[in-house]
Image (cartoon, grey):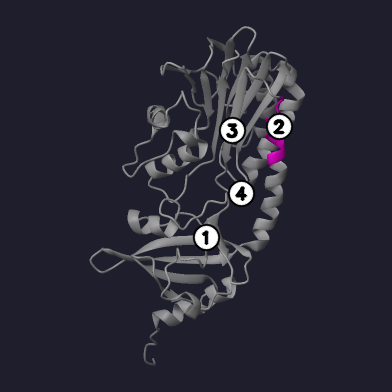
Amino acid sequence: MGDAMTFNLKDIMSSLSDGVYVCDLDRRITFWNESAERITGWAAGDVIGSRCFDDILCHVDKDGHRLCGEEYCPLHRAMVTGTGTRAPLLVYALGKDGRRVPMMVNVAPICDAGGRIIGGVETFRDATAMVHDLERAKVIQGLAMRHDLPEDPRVTFATHYIPHDIVGGDYYIIDRIDDHRYGVMLADVMGHGIAAALYTMHLSQLWDRFRGLARHPAACADRMNRELFRIMRGDSSFAAAVFGLLDLEERVFRLAGAGGPEVLLAHADGTHALLSSAGRPLGVDEDAPYEEAVSPVRRGDSILLFTDGAVEVMDASHEPLGTDGLITILRAQGHPKNAVRMDTLEEELLKYSNAIRLEDDLTLIEIRVGESF
């Protein structure tokens, strides 16, 4: 046999079809391969020696968050937490020609022989074709989730929806039933991505068919469950959901649970209650019973509905935030006197987690009963 062939690590990385760059702990770029140049247009000479958060790549995520700070930067978090990506992240980089380049990104910390973190590495590939189709699907899904309501001085609604991927498995609707009643549904289809998103479109169709039952949340849950069971049986999918009716005439909130998280009712005096109604997730059991719970509401109350992406966030010790942790974050915001600051709440959830991004879809709905109530 001939002599064993040896390879230079730099030559190996330069031959990869994926872009690769390496940073030190100050996030100063020390290596930039040829594919990175091909994908972004930036040559090695343009970027080596610069820090990755300098005004070169200007990474943003799918939701427009600038990633070059600390909390949102995947590479920074990998070096701080010692944990790389478990699945590729969708990131948009600024190409040298000024266009945004969608990329699927993986990051990992680099350790020396003693296990000490000395830098980080990012690999990426062009995702333009995939993202084009997903962005079109996102627009269609967004049209199905609505709360385009006439102004009502007695009540205000705020929503915040962040899918894990470009499209996700959460679905919500807020619907004015008559002059004094508003129906609301929040559902979380198991999983995320294309399959879950398709199920949310079916939920939208079902709501349009059965919105006449919205005055009776348990009856609405029953009919939608039976319809979903017919298409989900044989599949492992289901939808955890909450159905609600805000009745401004009777001054009550009616709730039917279908496997979704509890609903937080916060009073103006700072006290709160967790509202729940037992019921199996939609699509699991055709004959599942649903019950209705009724809670009085008064002036200044805040009703917060959320999917489990808001409470199942894990910290570095794998401890979930839980509902109590969510309430703690809200109180630090001055809630319920102040409305929920949705973007700030999302940042606090990310800080709590040991992940580079939130691991699930996140949807929040706040209903605030006004002073005219």
Dot 3 crowding, Cα within 10 Å, few <14, some 14–19, many 20+:
some
Q: Residue at x 42, y 68 (%)?
A: 51
Tell which tag, 1 or 4, sits nearer the viewer: 1
Q: Amino acid at mark 1?
A: His
**Dots 3 and 4: beta carbons under 8 Å?**
no
The first of marks 1 and 3 along the sequence is 1
Q: x%, y% of residue 96? A: 59, 72
Query: Which quadrant of the figure has residue 7?
Result: bottom left
Position of 135 relative to 117 (above/below): above
Magenta stretch secondary structure, dominant: loop
Q: Quadrant of the C terminus?
A: top right
Q: x%, y% of residue 345? A: 46, 37
Q: CA distance from mark 1 to mark 2?
A: 34 Å
Q: Amino acid at mark 3?
A: Thr
Identify the residue under disc 2.
Answer: 204
Identify the residue under disc 1.
Answer: 59
State the extent of the magenta-drawn residues as a range. 142-150
Dot 2 crowding, Cα within 10 Å, few <14, some 14–19, many 20+:
some
Q: Is 110 situated left or right of 59 in this image?
A: left
Identify the residue under disc 3.
Answer: 159
The reply to whether the magenta stretch includes residue 144 is: yes
Tell me the element at label 2.
helix
Tell which tag, 1 or 2, sits nearer the viewer: 1
The first of marks 1 and 2 along the sequence is 1
Q: Quadrant of the N terminus?
A: bottom left
> Which residue extends farthest left?
114
Nearer to me, 203 or 66: 66
Q: CA distance from mark 1 to mark 3?
A: 26 Å
Identify the residue under disc 4.
Answer: 166
Q: x%, y% of residue 148? A: 70, 30
Q: x%, y% of residue 136? A: 71, 50
